[in-house]
Image (cartoon, helix red, strand yellow):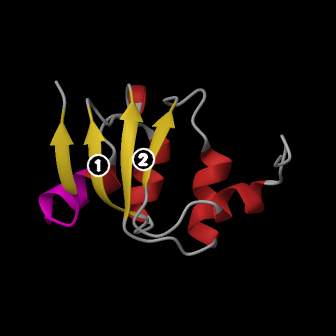
Amino acid sequence: MPPLWTDLAAAAALVKDGDLVALTGHTKAAPMALIRELIRQGRRNLGLVTVPTGGLNVDLAVGAGLADRLHFAQVVLEEYGMAPNFRRAVEQGILACREYP
């Protein structure tokens, strides 16, 4: 049986290029350490699913070139306004999006 606990680098190593990854949390409970570790490990072409809303976690992942597709209801930075990396990627056609209103 695999261990019940592992370190962050080993957990991120389970994610392979091209995988579809579900992210929970918005600004308060976003898995930022995991996003940063995936960036450090050089992952590319990930699909992201935001549950229910994406925020800084999604914006950072998109800005770093981690994701090439996104399933979402909304991506915002709450009182800080629009998520600039997300918006830029959508406007430039870099990010394939499926919106669920």
User: Up-down: is 11 above or below 73?
Assistant: below
> What separation in Å lies between label 2 and label 1 (alpha carbons)?
9 Å
Q: In the rendered structure, does residue 24 fall within the stretch colored magenta?
A: no
Pick out the residue farthest to the bottom.
42
Q: In front here: 88 or 79?
A: 88
Please state the extent of the stretch shown in magenta in the rendering: 87-95
Residue 13 position within the rendered picture, expressed as x and y whole percent measured from the top left: 66, 65
Return the residue at label 1: 70
Query: How many other residues sit within 10 Å of disc 1, few (<14), some (14-19) or many (≥20)?
Result: many
Query: How many other residues sit within 10 Å of disc 2, few (<14), some (14-19) or many (≥20)?
Result: many
- For the point 51% across and 70% down, the residue is 43
Pick out the residue farthest to the front.
1
What amino acid type is highlighted by mark number 1? Leu
Q: In the rendered structure, does residue 94 fall within the stretch colored magenta?
A: yes
Say whether residue 30 is left or right of residue 97: right
Residue 36 position within the rendered picture, expressed as x and y whole percent measured from the top left: 62, 58
Return the residue at label 2: 58
